[in-house]
Amino acid sequence: MQHTKDMSAYRYEQATQCLHSAKVLIDLGDYKGGANRSYYAVFHAMRSVMALANVDFGNHGQVIGYFRREFIKTDVFPKEMSRIIDVLFKARNKCDYDDFYIISKDDATTQLKSAEYFLEEISKYLTAKII
């Protein structure tokens, strides 16, 4: 049990580091980098929750699918979090793989705010589960 708590805490720390990086990158004008880090903040936050169940997967689609099925569809987390995952995942893919995609400062900032909300919800859950 302690191992799963330690893994969860480690993954949540990764999420908060990505969130911090997203803020810094957006402030520097690197909106693509900020969008990437906002998505990864959410990705690591999902994995921090899954660590408590001793569950992990090898790809993003499996992580997202499991998180939605086990935690959003069951109303552990608000349905809005599913939309956030979609928006951030799609933007990250465009930023990383579409050579000519341009993301605006406003869109990158909105994604950062969504990631902050997502991490706040995850933090509440982890605090209740770990204590």
Image (cartoon, grey):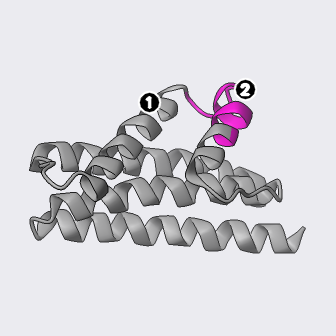
Relative to 10, say whether 47 is above or below.
above
**Callout 2 secondary element:** loop
Residue at image point 37% right, 44% down: 88
For disc 2, the neighbor class at 10 Å (few under 14, some 14 to 19, many from 20) is: few
Q: Position of residue 126 (x, y in %)?
A: 67, 55
Badge 1: how crowded within 10 Å, few (<14), some, or many (20+)? Answer: few
- Is residue 96 found inside the magenta-colored segment of the image? no
Q: Is residue 41 left or right of residue 1?
A: left
Which residue position is annotated with label 2? 74
Residue 28 rendering spot, x and y as whole percentages: 11, 71
Magenta-drawn stretch contains 68: yes
| Residue type, mark 2 in image | Thr
Disc 2 or disc 1, which is closer to the eye?
1
Residue occupying the point 61% across, 34% down: 77
Q: Which residue is drawn at 64% across and 49% down?
A: 63
Q: In which quarter of the image is residue 30?
A: bottom left
Report how far apart the C-alphas of labels 2 and 1 lie in the structure: 15 Å
Rendering coords of residue 26 (x, y %): 17, 62
Task: Give, as a single range, the part of the protein colored magenta.
Answer: 66-78
The local secondary structure at tag 1 comes to helix
The reply to whether residue 131 is visible in this rendering is no
Rendered image: mark on residue 83: 1
Residue 43 or residue 74, whichever sits in front:
43
Quadrant position of the C terminus in the picture: bottom right
